[in-house]
Amino acid sequence: MNIDFSVIIDLLTSEEIQKNIFPIKVTFLIISGLFLAFVIFASFYTHYFKWMFLNDAFEFLTRRPFGAKRMNRNWKKIKQRLDSKSETEYKLAIIEADKMLSSALKRMGYAGPTLEESLDKLTSATLPNIEDLYSAHQLRENIVRDQNYAVSFEQAKKILDDFENAFIHLQLLS
């Protein structure tokens, strides 16, 4: 059985067939336009699509994770607490850094009820100083449980350096 494609093409492009399928073409153009309008509406007027689109566009254009600028700003505030030379400020800096790491890991998909469980999902290949972070989190737990727990400047500086190394390795700080 031989199929002659030129005959089929001539039939489909004939003036009579084109007149008959014109309403179908117009209908499909209208449906396509409505679908395109819906996609644009969904992209720019619904919160989820807007959020996802803006996050992806921002990360693509800046080559940095979304929220990294805010992380840098918050990290500077935490580091400034060391300048106060007050033990309470050291403790607050450690607690805030721990909370910042916990929320960053949750946003990255390593969610867990506690920071320890989030860290359990990581390996040393993902985060080389993971053991330091466990001890930093343990120190934070000691601070929260015991108000009189003493923290020196050197200890606070080392803990914050551990957190900073983790943030840099996770590409959250520049």
Image (cartoon, helix red, strand yellow):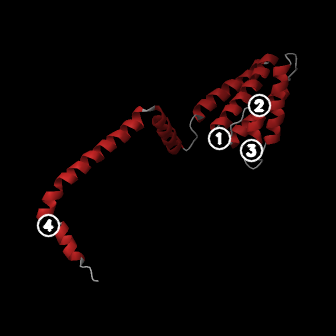
The residues tagged by marks 2 and 1 sit, at their Cα atoms, a distance apart of: 23 Å
Query: In the displayed structure, does residue 33 sit left or right of residue 96?
Result: left
Which is closer to the viewer, label 4 or label 2? 4
Q: Quadrant of the C terminus?
A: top right
> Residue 60's spot in the image, x, y percent?
51, 45
Classify 79 as above or below 61. Answer: above
Q: Label 3 sits on what residue type?
A: Leu
Query: In the displayed structure, does residue 144 sit left or right of residue 20?
Result: right
Query: In the displayed structure, does residue 154 sit left or right of residue 23?
Result: right
Dot 1 alpha-carbon crowd within 10 angstroms: few under 14, some 14 to 19, many 20 or more: few
Identify residue for label 3: 122
> Residue 104's spot in the image, x, y percent?
66, 35
Identify residue for label 2: 160
Is residue 86 in view? Answer: no
Dot 2 alpha-carbon crowd within 10 angstroms: few under 14, some 14 to 19, many 20 or more: many
In terms of depth relative to the viewer, which is nearer, 27 or 146? Answer: 27
Which is closer to the viewer, label 4 or label 1? 4
Q: Label 2 sits on what residue type?
A: Leu
Circle on res. 109: 1
Earlier-in-chain disc, 4 versus 2: 4
SS under mark 2: helix
The residues tagged by marks 4 and 1 sit, at their Cα atoms, a distance apart of: 58 Å
What residue is shown at x 26% (from left), y 50% (from top)? Answer: 28
Q: Label 4 sits on what residue type?
A: Ser
The residues tagged by marks 3 and 2 sit, at their Cα atoms, a distance apart of: 20 Å
> Residue 99's spot in the image, x, y percent?
71, 28
Identify residue for label 4: 14
Dot 3 alpha-carbon crowd within 10 angstroms: few under 14, some 14 to 19, many 20 or more: some
